[in-house]
Amino acid sequence: MAEITHRFIKTNGINMHIAEAGSGPTVLLLHGFPDFWYSWRYQIPALAKAGFHAVAPDIRGFDETDAPLEAEEYTAFDIVGDLVGLINALGVEKVFVVGHDWGAEHAWSLALFRPDKVRAVVTLSVPYSPRQEKGSSLKIIGERLGDGWYMNQFQKPGYAESEIRRIGLPAFLRNILLSSSTEPFVVPKGKKLGDVMNGSAELTSWLTEQDLNCYVRAFERSGLTGPINVYRAIERTWKLQAPYTKAKIEVPGFYIAGSRDIVWHVPGTRSYVEGGGLKHFVPKLRGYVVLDSGHFIHQEKSDEVNQLLISFMQKEQQQQSRL
């Protein structure tokens, strides 16, 4: 098994921690929330063995990467700036980019803003959805689900952090990472955010006590404000993205969903994907797969995901080498 090594890269005014293994075409692996590079522990060795250079950064605000204090420094443009600087520091022209959850959003944004840097994009859980004139996802979904929706609850500075501390990091992380609910996180009247994010789900073969301890240590290192700030930058990102309203992704893409993933059950997601909406906005979409999985697809179904990633990227590499 390829050894995973760690180092820091200076990019876009911050120090970014990366974990990497292997040599060959570079694959960026972008994590979501609440997560860090360790999310890809099942993919990094498999990709390295298959002849790829797997690179999993801690996104700004997370784990060992710097965490700017202001929420306005966590827009899609800031994060893509970090990734472009990382790509340049790695000394490569283009990369494959794979993202999960918020990492999927970052992957689509990288492909949208800098298609010259992307060979192809694969996302798990979150499909590409272009900017809409009527408002951000926070506004559109938030109006439907109300103030109790967790993303609305995350907007108040310090509140989510205090609620997570109240229930404890282990309980919060355990509940989110192992949640089997397909219902959105909405705080009922008379309850607090921590009440719906507290849990004692049983650990699994893909998320052990040792794994959970790694997560707890990572968030003890970073704190919670940096990771949550990406939610607080949603409205600013939407405003800055005005030139990209209804823009299409022009690089090859592939999408992996989980049948028990909460995102797949957000009203409109499934019909958008199955009805051709995703293909319309990603014209070079090579296809999509729905696995029997919850939200953390790449951990729960690591073997299947690894096979899909490797097969897709090898085919794209062969096809692009002929051009």
Image: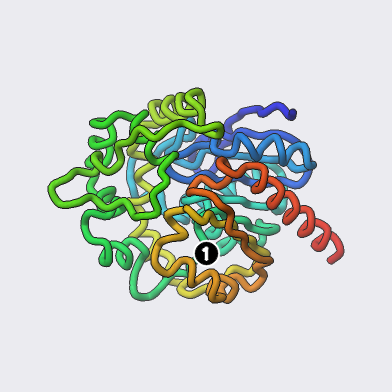
- As shown in the figure, which amino acid type bears the numbered disc 1? Tyr
Residue 136 left/right relative to 322: left
Q: Is residue 234 above or below residue 88?
A: below
| Closer-to-camera residue (212/225) | 212
| Closer-to-camera residue (19/197) | 197
Position of the C terminus by quadrant: bottom right
Residue 38 left/right relative to 146: right
Q: Is residue 36 above or below residue 117?
A: above
Q: Tag 1's secondary structure?
A: loop
Q: Whole-percent x and y of residue 305?
A: 64, 48
Q: Which residue is mark 1?
A: 128
Q: Residue at x 50, y 23 (%)?
A: 210
Q: Residue at x 26, y 66 (%)?
A: 143
| Closer-to-camera residue (213/103) | 213
Q: Residue at x 61, y 33 (%)?
A: 19
Packing grade of label 1 (10 A; few <14, some 14-19, many >=20) is many
Q: Whole-percent x and y of residue 224?
A: 34, 36
